Image: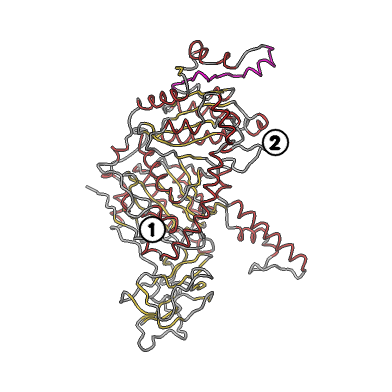
Amino acid sequence: MAKVLLKPIGSPRDKVLDDASFARQSSSMEKREERVLKARAEVRDGWGERGRQRVHSKGKLTTWERLDLLRDKDAPLLAVGTLVNYGDTFGERAKTSPGAGVVTAFTRVHGRWVVVIANDNTVANGSWWPRTPEKIQRAQEIARRMRLPTLYLVDCSGLFLPEQAATFPGPKGAGHIFKMNSLLSAEGVPQIAGVFGDCIAGGGYMPIISDKVYMTEQAYMVIAGAALIKGAKSMAMTSHSIGGPDVHVGVSGCADFRVPDDAHCIAALRREIETLPSSAVPYYRYGLEAAAPRYPCAELTGLLPADHRVAYEVHEIIARLVDDSLFWEFMPETGREVITGVARISGLYVGILANRSGLIDDPDQPGASKPAGILYRQGIAKLSTFSRACNDDGIPLLWLQDVSGFDIGPQAEQHGLLGYGSSLIYTNSTNSAPMATVLLRKASGAGYYALAGLPYDPVLQLSTPVTRLSVMEGRTLAIGAYNARLDENFAIVSDDPEERAEIEAGMAAVEQRIEGDMDPLASARQMDTDEVVLVGELRERLVAWAEMSYQSMGHRRIKNPRIWSLHDLFALEEGISGSRPLTSSAPAQDQAGQTGQTEPGDELAEGEAELIRSPSAGIFYGRPDPDAPAFVQVGDRIEAGQVIGLVEVMKTFNPIRWQPVSKAHGRVTRIEVVDQQELRAGQVLMALE
């Protein structure tokens, strides 16, 4: 019988990163996170205290108060689409629409995960703004694909009419919400609506296709409100008299039940969810319970560098996201720019596909290194194979992106990367297992597409405060835009001072604009990502995704672990071997496989035991930043695995760790390089006694 053999990964934080570096990186990340927290608070505030007082004066609860009553007391409220429309204004009076005037979120009700779609009644009486329909439809689509019960908390006065041209027509206009209602109903996904107040026009249609509709005494549902009827037909009446619970519960049958107020309505919705089948999550844990990672997720604030140019160990990221920090790695020695394997999150099996950061061995040039964070032939093939196998076995897929794109150049074309990339894109386009994508930092070019970016329909895509989503970096794009006016070294080809100044200003403007476009808050504003989360919140989000993936049974393939096709692949790959650390002691070799030429300092002096060499060509840096002390100085005692410098390769700073040949520690006798010195692969950096 095949077994899933999960193995420990990761190390205690102080073995991964020294205290000073961890503090420095934590501080940088926390500054980015402050922007996200501030934006969330502004959205949560809606239209402020005046809006809340107006709601309370009608004897109603605000939307956030309703949500707090709805969720189980120990359940999180995990909003998606929080920052839609953030910073945008509409109409002549430049009105804001925090969160596009609607809250969409996951939470648990009687132990079952549900999707909640709730109009924010403090923002223009819950009106629909530009992007409101798309935000509602995104939540409905997640619910449809995960078969999650869907609750509508309706308090909506219809379209914000001054912006109707951006909301009413189009393939994803307001009317598409009702198609999504219909698809959910056709596929047997429970939909339950509570109508709490205004429910006009499109807002009146949204609850009707739900399986159960509750109305409070303050609520009404009408195709057109009293004001419009008065204007059109000169009839004096109120909206409540036209379509209140007396009419729709007692006469029309468009609603099922009436309740006194908001609190009673929420209690009724909770009772309805309690009658549904219970979660299948315990069944699919196969006898195990959920377990926290061995290393705290909160450490990710300092372990994931905010500076996208700084390399890190992605195994340490995974170790702080998965149960017990246990992982079953697939083909660790093949396509080493990516990591694939199986872990448990909340006791449930998930497949993980992640980009490695830093330098890796180059299989085409023995002894040489090349940068990870880029997709090469073997890595793409490994991703495709693993993705197909997980989908066949019914294992949800988690993509951890930090990718600069595909390899380019003559060798890449000769290796057929276009074809391999097409295979990966086809695989992810046709997968039926739930996929979640986390954009840890860089999400660039075709790499973003190939690793299940939002255009490839993951059920959830999350960004972090340091995500950079774009075709390419701003400087690179500026060079491309002005390429005709640059030489082969990207220097401006002009002796005219005015023309040079014009080109410099133009390139700077392009770079600045692209940097702005890459802001994760900008991506969230225009729905290019589902939510921006703090890195310390990732584990909680992934627990919810894993549990939602397994909650409903019978609608998708889920094989038991004994008959996974993954086992066959592991057997053919002849077992598991751990990933190898980047070494810096062994001499590098040139393309012919011979060690590089001897230079001064290449031989051991009397009393010296070992030479530390550069693992790659690049630029050497002896300190983490210009104001920080050097990693090591002559006379320092160093330990195995300690960072002794950085080598910059393709704009990424890769740590050079001492991997001793024999001893576990040594003392630096001489340093042969200086800051910003250009290195060749295998060049001596320092010597030890």
Q: Position of residue 102 (x, y in %)?
A: 54, 34
Which label belongs to residue 158? Answer: none
User: Which region of the structure is painted magenta?
Assistant: 211-234
In this view, the residue in front, 103 or 526, is 103
Q: List x then y, in percent, for residue 198.
A: 56, 23
Task: Decide which of 401, 523 is in the foreground and name it.
Answer: 523
Q: Nearer the viewer, mark 2 or mark 1?
A: 2
**Residue 220 painted magenta:** yes
Q: Secondary structure at mark 1?
A: helix
Which residue is disc 2 drawn over? 93
Q: Nearer the viewer, residue 584 or 85?
A: 85
Q: Is residue 193 left or right of residue 235?
A: left
Residue 316: which numbered mark, if any? 1
Q: Amino acid at mark 1?
A: Glu
State yes or no: residue 458 in magenta. no
Residue positioned 69% across, 16% down in the render: 231
Where, by quadrant of the figure, is residue 93 drawn?
Answer: top right
* Residue reaching furthest to the left: 1
* Quadrant of the image occupied by residue 56: top right
- Circle 2: is it few (<14), some (14-19), or many (20+) Cα within 10 Å? few
Q: Where, by quadrant of the figure, is residue 101 drawn? A: top right
**How much space separates mark 2 and mark 1, taking CA atoms?**
50 Å
